[in-house]
Amino acid sequence: MGSVPAPGAHARPAGAGRSGPRSLRGRASPAALGRRAPARGAGARPGRGSSPPADGRAVRRARPPDASPVAGRVQGPAAAAGQDRRPGHARRPGSATPGRPRGGDACGPGGAGGTGGGDPRAAAGGVRARLPRRRAAVSFLVERRSELFGLIVQHLILVLLSTAIAVAIGVPLGILLTRKKHLARPVLAAAGVLQTIPSLALFGFLIPLPLVGGIGARTAIVALVLYALLPIVRNTYTGILQVDPAVAEAATGLGMTDDERLRLVELPLALPVVLAGVRIAAVVSVGTATIAAAVGAGGLGTYVFRGIATVDTRLILAGAVPAAALALAVDALLARVERSRRPARAAGALAAVVVASLVLLAFSARARSGQTQVVVGSKNFTEQVVLGEILAAVLEDRGFRVDRRLNLGGTTLCHEAVRSGRIDVYVEYTGTALTEILGRPARSDREGVLGDVRAGYAPLGLTVGAPLGFNNTFALVMRPDTSRRLGIRRLSDLAPHAATLRVGLFGEFVERADGLPGLMAAYGFRLAVPPTEMDLGLLYPALLADRVDVVVGSATDGLIAAHGLVVLEDDRHYFPPYDAVPIANTASLAAHPGIESALAALGGRLDEATMRRLNLAVDGARRSPAAVAREFLRSSGLSAR
């Protein structure tokens, strides 16, 4: 029978007094791990209950032979005063009640088993830190739910219309190629060439064309149809040719005519392949339709382009995620039709849905045609979108129903749109109109430039309104550290450093008469590194991220003041004045007399500081341009809404 240690004695494993590697292997007691101690082999002793675990750390370390015979306890950190008022151990205040271990008390910071994760209040703080971001995302979606739903409907209409038209053209064309095989190669090659044209380039080709060109949904639908033709024509042609010749010969032997054989034998057998082509075309159309916003056709691309212009990830995701979901939904629906046991019936049901959508679209278009409508356009950067919203809100207050065609693109696109009557009004800058549209040499006097623009626009059927009050000249902008290091404060200081500077600009500035070529000639410098062309909304993020050293912006950009950027002085007065003025189609003003008075009310109401503040509210505070425009009109007394 083994000896029993005396009460209070410190028990040690055998050999604990020996030095060596084995003595380093201690074992944690069950109490230290937060578990109940197993029953001892000697059994329970009469008259003695189980003793509480020792205070402090219950893990013993090996000691050298000359160590003190009494081992000191390793105390845990003292709790802060008033930190914990929950019931605790009767003899150890602040500890957990026996039988109720507290997270983080046992087995180190992880709690029992190391899974507690430390202080639960710290974890709760992390959750609370994430809540504002989630609330902001939810409030963003709630605030824009009606607009988002409208954009989804526009996107679906574009896809349904273009796919239906492509099927109506592509399937008969594919059938024709099976009968006229010598035409198959050139027709399929032409359809393949259309697929290689970038979507934006195709839209650009279509804009000046009569009947199918211009801006809006019509141009977008034409482009989407051209993109959708190749998979439909090719799959129809291939599917019919893959029908077993013996089956076709048997149908002929039964006395079927060519039309009967096609309708009763070849098309039913080829239908799964044809539907696969329609499926590909529809999914591609969902993705390509996002580009349609560049020509004022609406859809989810409106959010994508707006988000790029304002560098707002929320807007980009608000357009991209629903577009991806639509593509997946369309793909799943058509895949189910393709796998159907009765594909002809399923295809008929799908065709009925498309026809019903077209009928509803026709009725809604007819209902809208009876209302007075004014189309407001804008270019594709923040300030232009804000100004477009201001014009639209003023006109809505005067009783007009406004169709917003914002984020259209560059100067030429907006000019052609207002000249052709595709839009009724947009905001232009006098210096841009003088040099870019009229092709006149630049002048420095503001009144003279305004007079030249009015005289030059009148024969074009365009009316130039009163200036809004601010001059938005071009500005070359640098980070303050780069400006100090190189000693660059004026444009004339750029010449000695032109060989090392990285310049970022938007594509239009390279081709403009008042753009980069004239600027380099006026200040006598050449860039050793070709400039980096990018979207306007990406220029300032690239500058702040040290991707470029100089960017071409505008004097009213809100991010200049927000980030303390340096605007280089145009000490040789190269840039002409760029007063913001409304440009309206003269015929539209005659048809709707209230437009001119509404635009006149905005004359002189916007100075540079105000415009910079409005731009910053969109670019910096991530507010919607429509809300910023409404707030400005209310604060200016121009609107009571």
Image: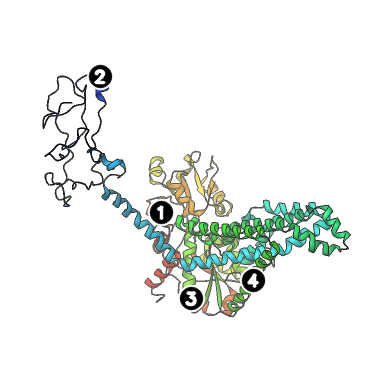
Q: Position of residue 516 (x, y in %)?
A: 54, 50
Q: CA distance from mark 3 to mark 4?
A: 29 Å
Separation of marks 4 and 1 at Cα, in angstroms: 48 Å
Under mark 2, the amino acid is: Gly
Asked which secondary structure carries label 1, the reply is helix
Residue topped by disc 2: 20
Task: Determine which residue is flagged by label 1.
Answer: 560
Query: Of tags 3 and 4, which is closer to the observer?
Result: 4
First along the sequence among labels 1 and 2: 2
What residue sits right under mark 3 in the picture?
A: 396
The number of discs equals 4
Kind of residue sitting beneath label 4: Leu
Is residue 628 depicted above or below 501 in this figure? below
Q: Nearer the viewer, mark 1 or mark 2?
A: 2
SS for dot 2: loop
Q: CA distance from mark 3 to mark 1?
A: 32 Å
The residues tagged by marks 4 and 2 sit, at their Cα atoms, a distance apart of 88 Å
Secondary-structure class at tag 4: helix
In the displayed structure, 390 sits above or below 108; it is: below
Within 10 angstroms of label 4, few (less than 14), some, or many (20 or more) residues?
some
| C-alpha gap between disc 3 and disc 2 | 90 Å
What amino acid is found at the position of numbered circle 3 in the picture?
Answer: Glu
- The residue wearing badge 4 is 358
- Residue 290 can be seen, yes or no: no
Q: Is residue 613 left or right of residue 1?
A: right
| Nearer to us in this view, 390 or 211 | 211
Mark 3 vs mark 4: which is more N-terminal?
4
